[in-house]
Image (cartoon, rainbow, N blue to C red):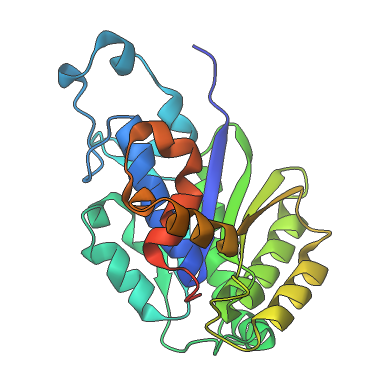
């Protein structure tokens, strides 16, 4: 059997955490992993039972539990509480979901300040190194966050710079959420986007821009689209979940 290339996902800020929750739910559905991390091979088809591609995103414990190779972080504690209160709350390692008690006030520079002075960046990188130690063939990182909010932009910039410094030979893929021009939660969102784009342009290998405005248009034109949970729609899961969660509140 060919060795799987592992990927570690990092979800930063409210938007990144919300997208991450639904993303991991879809991963579990695809690989027949239960909300508590177990995988009942006896109930699967032979083809599904022999599929070990899940190892790219899940590490398996000695007890047979599959744990996401992921780190969640938000300066607002509500994201952490929401994750553990969800149906898939038992899926994640408690120490890989980081929550703090002071919000970044939707300000890019406040986020950078908190990342350094409150040791948020150090906490995230500690968890990243532990996740890396569980990999045998690490391919790279997926970093989900928003450019409009303070945590996603400010903390995200600091974390990405540190990732680039410490793991410069690994691929960093950045699915980033751009805020909607018509539905804005903060007057400084355009400034956060400009600063984020400038500070992060040299530290990632690939950036995939996800436009909240386009997601809103899809929801308006196709009633019920945001609630669609068909497995066939998994390739479009990011746009779907942006609409479902109104991640304009980043």
Quarter-of-image position of residue 199: bottom right
Q: 62 or 237, which lies in front?
A: 237
Q: 103 or 179, which lies in front?
A: 179
Position of residue 182 relative to residue 3, above or below, is below
Taking the image as shown, residue 36 lies to the left or right of residue 129, namely: left
Q: What's the residue at 21%, 54% (across, down)?
A: 87
Taking the image as shown, residue 112 lies to the left or right of residue 57, namely: right
Position of residue 157 relative to residue 35, above or below, is below
Query: How many labels sit on residues?
Result: 0
Residue 70 in sight: no
Taking the image as shown, residue 103 lies to the left or right of residue 60, namely: right
Q: What's the residue at 77%, 65% (across, down)?
A: 200
Quarter-of-image position of residue 233: top left
Position of residue 58 relative to residue 15, above or below, is above
Q: 241 or 224, which lies in front?
A: 224
Q: What's the residue at 56%, 77% (across, down)?
A: 151
Residue 197 coordinates in the image, percent (x, y): 77, 68
Residue 150 in sight: yes
Residue 66 coordinates in the image, percent (x, y): 32, 39
Residue 171 coordinates in the image, percent (x, y): 71, 43
Q: 85 or 187, which lies in front?
A: 187
Position of residue 92 relative to residue 15, above or below, is above
Residue 242 coordinates in the image, percent (x, y): 46, 59
| Residue found farthest to the front | 221
Q: What's the residue at 22%, 39% (across, down)?
A: 34
């Amino acid at each position: 059997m060919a060795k799987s290339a592992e990927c570690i996902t990092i979800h930063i800020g409210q938007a990144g955490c919300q997208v991450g929750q639904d993303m991991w739910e879809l991963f579990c559905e695809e690989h027949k992993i239960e909300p508590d991390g177990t995988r009942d091979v006896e109930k699967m088809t032979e083809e599904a039972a022999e599929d070990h591609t899940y190892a790219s995103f899940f590490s398996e414990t000695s007890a047979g539990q599959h744990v996401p190779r992921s780190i969640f972080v938000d300066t607002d504690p509500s994201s952490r509480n929401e994750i553990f209160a969800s149906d898939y709350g038992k899926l994640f390692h408690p120490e890989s979901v980081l929550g703090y008690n002071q919000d970044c006030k939707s300000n890019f520079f406040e986020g950078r300040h908190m990342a350094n002075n409150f040791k948020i960046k150090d906490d995230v990188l500690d968890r990243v190194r532990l996740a890396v130690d569980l990999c045998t063939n690490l391919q790279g990182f997926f970093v989900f966050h928003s450019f409009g909010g303070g945590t996603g932009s400010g903390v995200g910039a600091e974390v990405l710079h540190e990732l680039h410094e410490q793991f410069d030979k690994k691929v960093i893929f950045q699915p980033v959420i751009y805020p909607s021009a018509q539905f804005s939660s903060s007057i400084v969102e355009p400034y956060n986007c400009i600063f984020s784009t400038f500070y992060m342009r040299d530290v990632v290998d690939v950036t995939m821009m996800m436009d909240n405005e386009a997601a809103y248009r899809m929801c308006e034109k196709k009633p019920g689209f945001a609630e669609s949970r068909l497995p066939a729609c998994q390739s479009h899961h990011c746009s779907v979940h942006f609409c479902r969660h109104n991640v304009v509140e980043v």
